[in-house]
Every structure is written in structure tokens, then in C-alpha cells.
Image (tube, rainbow, N blue to C red):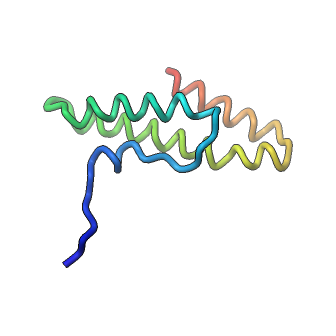
């Protein structure tokens, strides 16, 4: 018998990496994720929204080390575009 448990809140809001650039996004994802988990209407749409925001945050966190290593403006522009889409 497996002892691994599934927690919806953790699965929806867990982000990879810890950078100051995405700290506010991470906190907002957690705040919204808390409300989404207690919602009873439009749950699928709300889960998709939080999952998309979390995935964008994770992608930004994966790209940030490349910006520091390569000093690449292309990667920087990608990160900036993703942050803009999170804000929208």
C-alpha cells in the first residue's frame, strides 16, 4: 500500500525554483489556489487557470539561470513576455 498522498492545493500551487523575480507570482498562485480548491463552480476552468500560471512561473524559473550564465537578451525577452502574461 502506498503512503503517498495527493493534496490538490500542493499539486496546483507547487513551483520549482526560488527566485525573487517570481516570489510575488508564487504568493499570488498560492492565494488563488486556496480559493480555487474551495470553489464549487467552474472548477475545471479555475484549475486550468492556476495550472497555467504555475507552469509559466516554473518556466520563468528554469530560464533565469540561463539569463545569468549567457547574458542572453533573447532569454531575457522571453522571461519578460511570460511575466507580462502572468500579470494579465
Q: Is residue 3 shown left or right of residue 63?
A: left
Instruction: Decide: is 58 above or below 2.
Output: above
Circle count: 0
**Rendering coords of residue 30 (x, y %):** 39, 35
Quarter of the image for the N terminus: give it: bottom left
Residue shown at the point (45%, 36%) measured from the top left: 53
Residue situated in front as seen by the camera: 6 or 56: 6
Q: Report the residue that reaches farthest toward the left.
A: 40
Quadrant of residue 58 within the rendered picture: top right
Residue situated in front as seen by the camera: 70 or 30: 30
Residue shown at the point (82%, 36%) measured from the top left: 73
Q: Report the residue that reaches farthest toward the right.
A: 71
**Rendering coords of residue 69 (x, y %):** 83, 49
Residue shown at the point (53%, 28%) measured from the top left: 24
Q: Is residue 51 shown left or right of residue 69?
A: left
Quadrant of residue 6 within the rendered picture: bottom left
**Rendering coords of residue 10 (x, y %):** 34, 48
Q: Report the residue that reaches farthest toward the top.
A: 88
Q: Is residue 1 shown left or right of residue 11?
A: left
Residue shown at the point (46%, 31%) measured from the top left: 27
Q: Is residue 23 shown left or right of residue 78?
A: left
Quadrant of residue 83 within the rendered picture: top right
**Rendering coords of residue 64 (x, y %):** 70, 43
Amino acid at each position: 500500500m502506498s503512503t503517498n498522498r495527493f493534496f490538490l492545493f500542493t499539486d496546483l500551487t507547487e513551483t520549482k525554483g526560488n527566485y525573487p523575480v517570481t516570489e510575488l507570482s508564487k504568493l499570488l498562485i498560492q492565494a488563488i489556489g486556496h480559493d480555487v480548491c474551495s470553489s464549487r463552480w467552474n472548477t475545471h476552468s479555475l484549475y486550468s487557470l492556476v495550472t497555467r500560471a504555475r507552469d509559466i512561473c516554473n518556466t520563468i524559473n528554469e530560464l533565469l539561470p540561463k539569463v545569468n550564465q549567457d547574458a542572453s537578451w533573447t532569454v531575457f525577452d522571453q522571461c519578460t513576455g511570460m511575466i507580462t502574461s502572468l500579470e494579465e
